[in-house]
Image (tube, helix red, strand yellow):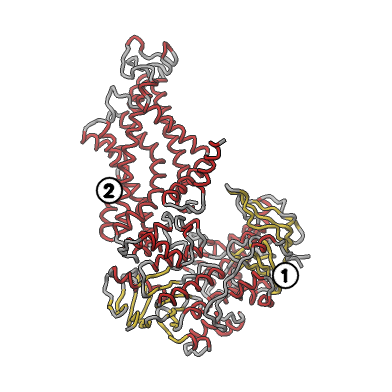
Amino acid sequence: MSLLDVENLWVKFPTRTGVFDAVRGISFSLGQERLGIVGESGSGKSMTGRAILKLIRPPGQIIADRIAIEGEDIIAMNERQMRKVRGERISMVMQDPKFSLNPVMTVGNQIMEAYRIHTRSSKTEAKRKALEMLEAVSIRDQERVFRAYPHEMSGGMGQRIMIAMMLIPDPRILIADEPTSALDVSVQTQVLSIIDRLVKERGMGLIFISHDLNLVSSFCDRVLIMYSGRIVETCRADKLHEAQHPYTRGLLNSLPRLDAPNRRLEVLQRDPAWRDAPSVSGRI
Amino acid sequence: MNAIDISDLNVWFGKGRDRVDAVRNVSLTLAQGGSLGLVGESGSGKSTILRALTGLAPNWTGQMAVVGETLGRRRTRSFYQTVQMVFQDPYASLHPRHSIDQVLSETLTLHGYRDIEPRIEKLLADVGLGPSFRFRYPHQLSGGQRQRVAIARALAPEPAILLLDEPTSALDVSVQAEILNLLTDIRAERNLSYMMVSHDLAVVGHMCERIAVMQNGEIVETMSVDDMRAMRMTHPYSKHLLSASMGVQTDDILSDL
Amino acid sequence: MTDRISQSGWRAWLTSDTPTSRRQAKLSSWYHGWLAFRGNPMAMFGLGILIFLILVAIFAPLIAPHDPLAQDLGNRLKPLGESGHLLGTDSLGRDILSRLIYGARITLYIVILVALIAPVVGLFIGTVAGYTGGIIDAILMRITDIFLAFPRLVLALAFVAALGAGIENAVLAIALTAWPPYARIARAETLTIRNSDYISAVRLQGAGPLRIITKHIWPLCLSSLIVRVTLDMAGIILAAAGLGFLGMGAQPPTPEWGAMISEGRRFILDHWWVATMPGLAIFTVSLAFNLLGDGLRDVLDPKDGGS
């Protein structure tokens, strides 16, 4: 059984001029793998991630035939039941840790709280677990970080803390929405390798949302390419550079390359037919 | 004569205990018609050099000269007719309540032009925006269109030197290609000198002939783009930065650290 | 039929994504604001009340059933609806409804004058302090702090006591005590705007501080000030009424609402309507301003991009 199975997912936003469909009927599944979702801004990739957690605010609507986590459909769940699902079974790491951490609470308290919401354990137990988790995200001086406030942390450190916080209730699925695009390249690789190690060790499924094709191709197992709310192509990540769809090809070719200099870059010519082509299924 | 000469530049923010030395003993030159890329990670001081040059960072020591003219504390209007800048985030660099028309006509007025109407039309055409964009507000434009407006504004006083502060880092890759092509064309047409700041080595490699690598406020190495492509660099930090940008497998880099 | 077509033509012109002139662009952005505002029923309700108030003030002589100043001691303290007085009469036999209608003029007069003085002073001081910084900022803000340190009504009382009682002086006193919060808001906004890229960009065009403050910072501060002023209007009306109540504002026999309450206070147990009617009027207008302010905040807040 796959960890996550999504069938015919739509995200709709009513506006003054009509209904805007951010995600238009996509289907995909996730096993114990690293699944990349790539696309440009406005392609619906972030909305997909949020819709799985049912984190779309009204008046936005989530419509789907099925969103099943380990076989259990969450579409009919109410907000209270969803709160148990979030954290315990799926977690999410956002782009910028600066906006996701509470600035007036120490790092340790935030991680402990994340743990105790779901487990009703004692304080000492929670602290032990939090320190363990900080160690798991390769933070050397755990006691010091435990007592520190978020603003005392660098961007890379903040993102590691976020990961620790999100993984402490031991979820089965992690959604990472551009987790490294606010970070410098060298820090980026460290954070990615931490995510990678933890996901592997715990047998989790990872959905990695990013605009960076090279990053996704080197980091993930399988890739969904999204364009204006639909999946236009899926492929194995290491075969991304052999992708067939003109949109994917256009994105790849528009990147400047150090190893192949040319005076002018190729410009993506958008074909209106891409928008209307039916969504490709991302199920295995 | 060089377009830009900088020697022993130090720039700092704050004072006393809070003083942060953002740029330390930086010397660099930009030949006329040349292009220089500054690369480094956030906090390496690369943008601060541009801000000191344009007078936006007031605390500095050292010598800076633009087209042979030494810069003092204050920038004259003729300086701004020689040097212009394009900012990183096109969502932040346009006034939210000013239409494109207002932005360009104010700029032209400030530089003392009289024939504003034809100039606005020409500027818009030069950056690939049709006349229908003229009376729109920034929130009616996409990121790429906004950045084109910002480029038009920078071109308005017909400068000789353009400073580019991460001009495409907030844009999608397909839009980035369009903007970089536009900048390449403009440079060829107007024989401009570029100084470009970026964290993306591929972008800088595409746009610039010379590259300066910065770390902690200092330039650790300057090389030609051919040297960089051939990995002929000496400083370990430059090597590290390049290998990280080349998209080398995660594990290799970690073992490298 | 033609009417409808020309109407939809106007709408298309106003909502066009590609305006062809400065005027159209400006009008179109106003129209979009109006569409957003119209979608808020409470704000529309507030606006409706205020338009009604303005109409009443303009046409007071036509609407008022009686002379607001005419005394009729034989008919004093008549309850609601008795002998042609819809809202009754006060202790001198004057028709309360007519006094309320004429009082709307005074209320509007106060509101407009204060709204013209206080935010303008606050905007000027706040933006100059925020943009220039350093010693000028320190001096201006300490002055603001001094004004803020006094309770508003007490300070206004002191001003009126020094200037003499009367409605103009009451307005002046209220305005003088009302500007510091606006200066604070304008300064805070300026501090965030000052370091933004679009200000840097216009500095790189050689623009001086005066142009930057008036053309680039003011338009952005203005919207939050307008919202704040409308939300404060209730407080201003109440302060004016308070001064009137204490006998420091409008002088008898002027039908100012606060003064009317003060007068009615003496009979509040036996003749409740004398104080209640002007109280209800103040309450309604204050509420209307608050609703309007809430609606304007949704439309004008620049953080939503104004789209």
Tell me: residue B61, above or below residue A101: below
Residue highlighted by disc 2:
C146
| Residue C245 screen position, x and y as percent | 32, 28
- A284 above or below B67? above
Q: CA distance from mark 1 to mark 2?
A: 65 Å
Q: Which quadrant holds the N terminus of chain A?
A: bottom right
Horizontal side of residue B27 vs B203, given as left or right: left
From the top left corner, tell me how far across and down residue B180 is, in percent.
Answer: 50, 73
**Residue placed under numbered mark 1 in the picture:** A32
The percent position of residue B119, horizontal first and vertical second, equals: 38, 63
Which secondary structure, mark 2?
helix
Mark 2 belongs to which subunit?
C
The residue lying toward the viewer, choosing from C160 and A268, is A268
Q: Is residue C251 left or right of residue A104?
A: left
Instruction: Return the mark for residue B180.
Output: none
- Percent position of residue C30, x then y: 45, 46
Chain bearing mark 1: A
Please name the amino acid that badge 1 sits on: Gln
Label 1 crowd (10 A; few <14 / some 14-19 / many >=20): some
Query: Dot 2, how many residues are within 10 Å of its Cα: few (below 14), some (14-19), or many (20+)?
Result: few
Quarter occupied by the C terminus of chain A:
bottom right
Q: Is residue A157 visible?
A: no
